[in-house]
Image (cartoon, rainbow, N blue to C red):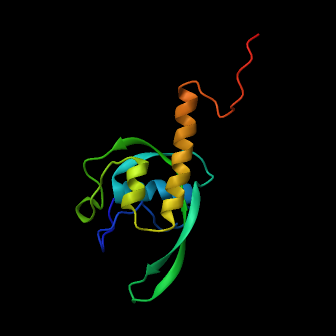
Amino acid sequence: MTSRDTGRWIIPKGNINGRSTPSKAAEKEAYEEAGVKGTITSSIPLGSYTYSKKLESGEARAATVEVYLLRIKERLKKWPEKGERKRSWVSTKKAVGLIEEPGVVPLLHRLMEFEDTLANRERGFSDDPRPKRRG
């Protein structure tokens, strides 16, 4: 999805308000900003990054973002920020080329490693190079 101000490609992020947990806040931001509903797959984040957040006053402040994986169950046709952003579905590899936030790119590379591992497991392959013993 794109940012509201510059139109650069980003991932959903936001603030944790009240009693919300980081993972619940991530689910909420994904709904509001990208129009997707789903569940966070783990309370442990994929990783985190720091970026320079521009405040309304014009001042810049360092902000740290924890990134969670969301298992998407529904893509909505209408959502709160639909008129303010563009949304596109691309592979993780293509996202690496689109995202300009430097801290996000290493997290996308990490996600690609997970995707490879999961794909190999589904195909019956293992990360272990030793041949399986048949008995």
Residue 54: horizontal and vertical position, in percent? 42, 82
On-image quarter of the C terminus: top right
Residue 134: horizontal and vertical position, in percent? 73, 13
Q: Quadrant of residue 84?
A: bottom left
Please determine whether, in this image, residue 121 is positioned above or below residue 20: above
On-image quarter of the N terminus: bottom left
- Tally of numbered tags: 0
Q: Quadrant of residue 12?
A: bottom left
Taking the view exactly as shown, the residue that stands out farthest to the front is 130
Q: Nearer the viewer, residue 11 or 15?
A: 11
Q: Residue at point 61% right, 51% down?
A: 43
Please determine whether, in this image, residue 24 is positioned above or below residue 37: below
Please determine whether, in this image, residue 79 is positioned above or below residue 39: below
Q: Is residue 123 visible?
A: yes
Q: Residue at point 52% right, 41% down?
A: 115
Residue 47: horizontal and vertical position, in percent? 59, 59
Taking the view exactly as shown, the residue that stands out farthest to the top is 135
Q: Quadrant of residue 8?
A: bottom left
Q: Is residue 128 left or right of residue 17?
A: right
Q: Residue at point 71% right, 21% down?
A: 132
Residue 68: horizontal and vertical position, in percent? 53, 54
Q: Is residue 21 visible?
A: no
Q: Residue at point 44% right, 68% down?
A: 101
Q: Nearer the viewer, residue 64 or 92?
A: 92
Taking the view exactly as shown, the residue that stands out farthest to the right is 135
